[in-house]
Structures are given as C-alpha cells and as structure tokens.
Image (cartoon, helix red, strand yellow):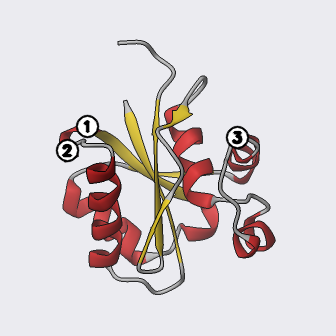
Amino acid sequence: MIFAGIGSRKGVSEQQVLSAISAALAEYRLDLSSLGGLATASLKRDETAIHSAARQLGLPLIIVDDTDLARAGTETPSRSELSLTLTGVASVSEAAALAAAGEGARLLGPRLLLDSVTCALAISGEVE
C-alpha cells in the first residue's frame, strides 16, 4: 500500500495539491490506483485543500498525530527549517507518508515540491 504524504503552505488550492500528487506519482511511474490514501500532520487538519483533494480522489485522509509524526520524522531525508520550527519534523510530507504507511514503511524517494505543496510517497513494509 502506498500513501501520499502532503505538506503545504497555508491557503493552497485543491488543484495545487492534486498537481503535486500527480507529479509525485509520475516521478515513480505510478498511477492513482496505486494510492491507498493521503496523510498529513495534525497542524494541517484544517487545510481545506488537502481534504478536498482526498475527496476528489476518493481516498481517505489520515491526520497523523504529533507523536507518530515525530517518530517517523527521524527517517526523513529532506529538511525544511520552517517545517522543523512549526512541527518539530524536518519534512511533514515525508514523515506523514511514513507514519500512514506503518511499521517498516519506506519512502520511494525524497519529497517533491511543486507550487507550495510537498508530496512524498511511502510504501508499507508489508510484502505483497
């Protein structure tokens, strides 16, 4: 199962979020059917565009609690000083994707930044 972790500046649009997800999927030659859901940090729980994007895609949105985000945040290769200051993790999108994908999850690669939205893809540790 693959999860898309989403981070963003406040006030981005649904289309910006959808475009970042599409770009991340294209980067790894995946299609939308590969995604099991979207994930973001509790700090972003009220970000309308992220909720709207999840509804548009017909996917669940997982709001990762701060403890799980911090735990997963130790595994992120990217670093944003703003993210670190606001959330305590260096990459919200990477940490959220890892936390949502569960134990043994791994990132497919570093987050992708597109138009004020970051998207990272993580695959669960379960072997198919």
At label 1, which amino acid type do we have?
Answer: Ser
Foreground pick, 63 / 2: 2
Q: Residues within 10 Å of mark 1 (few under 14, many from 20)?
A: few
Verify CB contact (< 8 Å) between mark 2 and mark 1: yes
Left/right placement of residue 79 relative to residue 54 reads right
Left or right of 56, for residue 54: right
For numbered disc 3, what is the local secondary structure? loop
Based on the displayed image, in which of its 4 quarters is residue 114 positioned? bottom left
Quadrant housing the C terminus: top left
Which residue position holds label 2? 31
- Looking at marks 2 and 3 on the same chain, the residue that comes earlier in the sequence is marked by 2
**x 21%, y 56%: residue:** 57
Image x and y of residue 50, in percent: 39, 68
Q: Amino acid at mark 3?
A: Glu
Residue under the point 26% across and 59% down: 22
Residue for badge 1: 34
Element at badge 2? loop
Please determine whether, in this image, residue 88 is positioned above or below residue 98. below
**Residue 75's disc number:** 3
Q: Residues within 10 Å of mark 2 (few under 14, many from 20)?
A: few
**Amino acid type, residue under disc 2 in the picture:** Asp
Q: Viewed as shown, does residue 66 lie left or right of 39?
A: right
